[in-house]
Amino acid sequence: MPVFFLHKVKAIFFIPVKCRLVLLKRTLIPVKSLLLAEMMSLAREVVHPCKRREYTFTCLVCPLSGVKYSAIPILAILSEDNTVTIVKINQPTISMRKSVLFILLCMSGVSAYAQQVLKGTVKDATSRQPVPGATVKVVGKTTGVTTNEKGEFQIDVPANAQLQISSVGFENVTIAAKLIQAGPILMQIRLMDMKEAVVVGYGTQQKRNVTNSISTVKSTELTAEKNIASDFGKALQGRVPGVYIASREGTPGNAASIMIRGAQSVSAVATNPLIVIDGLVVDGNTISINSINPQDIESVEVLKDAASAAIYGARGSTGVIIITTKKGRANSKPTLNVNMYTGVNNVPTSRHMMNTAEYASAFDDSRNNRIGDIDNKLANPGNLTAGQIKQLNDEKTVLKNQLAGFNVADRSIDWLDRIKHKNAPVNNLQASMSGGGDRNNYYMSLGRYAETASMGSGRYERITGRLDVTQQVNNWLKVNGNINITQGVNKDMSNPIIAAMSARPDTPEDPIILPDGMLGYYIGIQQHPLGAMMDNKNKNKTNIYLGSLSADLQLMKELSFRSAFNATKYNGLSINFMPPTGYQGYFNNGVFKTTGTDNFSYNFDNYFTYNKRISKLGINATLGYTYYSNELNSFGYELYGFPKIDNITGGGAAATYGSTANIGSMNTNNREISDAYFFRTGLDWEGKYLLNASIRRDGSSKLAKDNRYSWFPSVSAGWDMSRESFLSDVKVVNQLKLRTSYGMSGNMRPLGYFDSRNLMKATSYVGNQALILNTIVGNPSIRWERTKQLDAGVDVALLNNRITFTADYYNKTTDGLMTSNDVSWIYGAGNMPDNIGSIRNYGVDLQLAVSSRQGATIGWRVSTNMNINRNKILSMKDSTALFGALVFGGPQSRSKVGQPVGSVMLFESQGVDPQTGDMIYTDRNKDGRWDSNDYVSVPIALPTFTGGTTLTLSYKRFTLDALFTYVVGNKVYDYYEQTLRNYSLDYTGAMPNKFDNLANRWKKPGDVSDVPRAITGVHGAGQTADWNSKPSTQFITDASYMRLRNISLAYVVPAAVLQKAKINQVRVYASMENVFTITKYKGFDPEAVSNTGIVSTNLPNPRAAVIGIDLTF
């Protein structure tokens, strides 16, 4: 039976309706008549709507019998006999559970069911201040109005309509339109919800009951303006404590590297965590993590401790990232969202080369200094032989001829600046639609991201599409299917950074095109920097398909079963043509190379879930089985010998004009199969005492039979002290939970598909067919890497969750480290995979968040996190092991007992001798020689601590977001600086240019400088040609930095402006990425270095600036 309210009062009416108040003792109080004004006071303020069309009110004054009521919730339910039931009396106040407001008003010409204009006010439930800019719309309609500065609004509504009120920072409110004028609509500030679900392996848990170390990132942190690069990994930078994410390469489309709680493998490529997308296990070594559109992601859970990752067994030791994608909502009309932005990328200038005058001075000094050394030796020949004297005189003659023939042009170009593509465009367009009916929901999206290289040449384009459909077939069966398609294309990418650093500053602006079509060279065969960008015809194309099909069966109230088939398909094709007229193809008369990869993997999961509550005891359990298959095929071929004709890029040209004998081909076929049984159970007593345990048994075809299977157990416990009686009255504390966990997980990523077996391959010997061993000897004794981790943490929430704090201490040890160990060639190969040692990581994760709202117009939130990690190798079979690839002429990156992973072996520099201008190195064994016995081990690959801080400030319709990230204690080895200390002519016939800081080098006795003199030929105490440029500690530099990673400003357009356009919401924004960096590092980018800590040819990360718009229909 409906309740009617008068929306316009012209006079005071008496209600000719008999009413009764029924007290607990059934005492009847007849009421002959009530004033309308008094009846309306029963429903003075609306708080929020409740289920089943019941509405909550706050009663301030009751006119009946002079009894005063406290400000308490009252549910307005109309009873058949028009009575008010009072269930509890606490004098002098009365709390009411049910009340009836039955008001029949007779207004001439006014019908309660007709279209009407309603006026209302929206206020903050806490401060009772107005909420301006709130959107008010009729449920089911796309248009609406917004509140003014006083929180007031006016809207046309049909009879029996419901209104939805929303505002940034508040919980949404839905209320019957007929209740609007009963009083102001009060909105609650949206704060952290302890009851929200957290996704864990094969299930979910309430956040309050989690006893593991799990961090969550919501979709609001992954929006387009906060992640211009549209890369999932980069979007997480600085947002999760204990997760170190680095964008090590500024090339468009390049994915970031992710490391959770330190490096726990001596393999430089085995640090990325396991990625699980809606239950689909993704192999990060093959499929890039940026293959999924960040705007399709609903939430991200990062499992950091072994207890949470142990459910993934042999794949979880490096951590697990679980991605849950967006889905439609049942009983909702179609909602279309379009987000687009456009902008530019630029590489900030941070390093410069010598100008022409400085270059000429360095060339002259290097020759004259060597001639001076030769003259000193010839003046005091000592034990020099006649042959040695002749050799010195010949060298002196060559140097004089170089000086006599040396000249420079009247131009000076900074080629590092010239190869930049200034204001390189970047564009993004994403569209999604979602909705659902009574028993189904859907979500679909399309996206296109395009970026042009800001240094060098090339362009990256990514197109994504996603479809997710869920159908509730009946009360016990629900099915879901989804597919994600990504196509990425890199075209004509080039990295001319070496050519730009090496090129003489007087090299002409345009490459020289010779009459035969060849690219000419100004000096010798030195590559022209612009020619390096032109001489590049390549295309890398990837197609990635991610799909899943699942069925959920509700077998009993407490028991459910889930079966899910998840599959990935990856096709990659790389085509590279180096024409014979270019620098790269010149030596082989052109090269055409094609390589391809085809990867298909799937996991088939089946598991039961049991949930039951028996009085105060809660029980949940999961039991299941999973099967995983991964097949990887690759192919490729190379063709040589092409005519010097433009636009000849096909392989057929080589067969026609070139030699078919110069054709190489390669192909591989690999497959891995694994399966596992797993069980997890959880108990809680009144939500206070929490206990969880899991165990998993994994097996893999990568391992030999005796070591194929292994167990991975875990246990965790928690105590929610805030639910204890001694804290129940402490209103300031919303949660105080202590937790601890211990578990074991595994890793086998460093292991090849067949590393436990000896494989043969066909070849030829003395013209006949033969079989030989592969380059790696198989090891049937190799086993899993096992990581055991202890975690202890505390979760705190205060002041209605406005302040939250989380702290974790962890200590994890990994044994059975896998790597390829050197063995004698009597085995037929030089190395063999082996378990060689153990490593330890320990540290602290900290996170603090504070949010508040000042009045009705200003809100703010600050969240900061930090990880402090220490890494140490505990044991190894040999004293050291190679970490990463060898660098020609550079440092040896190795792992050594007692040192962190990724230390480099270097000579210890003592600076520049002010008398001679040459470097001084420590002779550690005092034998008068400088060799590998004098090396010191210097840790550089891992930072001491990392973290980030996010700031959010909202004012009326404006929202400002900023993200700062910082990395402290990491060092890098500047391989660029080392190689350019050499002043000799290189293989091109020219002396490469130098960084401009070398202009401040030592020049005469008594000079104090950190840069040695310019010299070519043998020199220094060791009398070697590379004495001043030996790999040493002089090239170690502090690469700590703090970076304003992202800053964005958004504005929500008032709904009244959009009403005629049928647009639900419009948000415009401007955003910048990599805004500035504070660092002592003098190189290009302290972040863009290899994971070994060695600066090589990595392009710096660009600075991006975009403007965009977000539309919701």
Image (cartoon, rainbow, N blue to C red):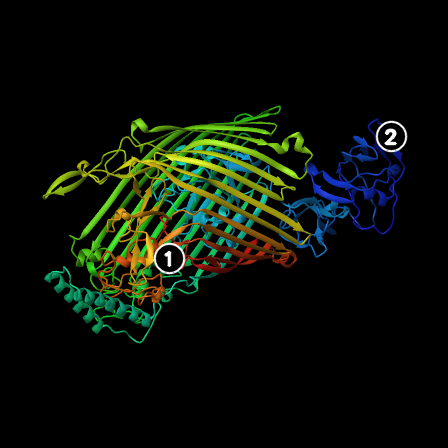
Q: In which quarter of the image is residue 153?
A: bottom right
Q: In which quarter of the image is residue 23?
A: top right
Looking at marks 1 and 2 on the same chain, the residue that comes earlier in the sequence is marked by 2
Which mark lies nearer to you, 1 or 2? 1
Q: Which amino acid does label 1 sit on?
A: Leu
Note whether 802 is above or below 1011 in the view shown.
above
Label 2 near label 1: C-beta < 8 Å? no
Note whether 885 is above or below 976 in the view shown.
above
**Which residue occupies 51% across, 53% down?**
964
**Residue 358 image offset from top left, x and y in percent:** 32, 70
Marks 1 and 2 sit apart, C-alpha to C-alpha, by: 85 Å
**Residue 124 image offset from top left, x and y in percent:** 70, 48
Query: Which numbered dot is residue 28?
Result: 2
Numbered disc 2: secondary structure: strand
Q: Which amino acid does label 2 sit on?
A: Leu
Whether residue 964 is visible here, answered yes or no, is yes
Q: Quadrant of residue 549?
A: top left
Locate residue 236 relative to residue 50 in the image: left or right: left
Numbered disc 1: secondary structure: loop
Locate residue 125 relative to residue 575 in the image: left or right: right
**Which residue occupies 82% across, 33% down?**
83
**Residue 479 image offset from top left, x and y in percent:** 49, 35
**Residue 315 image offset from top left, x and y in percent:** 39, 36
How many numbered marks appear?
Answer: 2
Give the farthest residue toward the top. Answer: 614
Nearest the camera: 759 or 387?
A: 387
Around disc 1, counting alpha carbons within 10 Å, would you say few (fewer than 14), some (14 to 19), or many (20 or more)? many
Query: Which numbered dot is residue 1099?
Result: 1
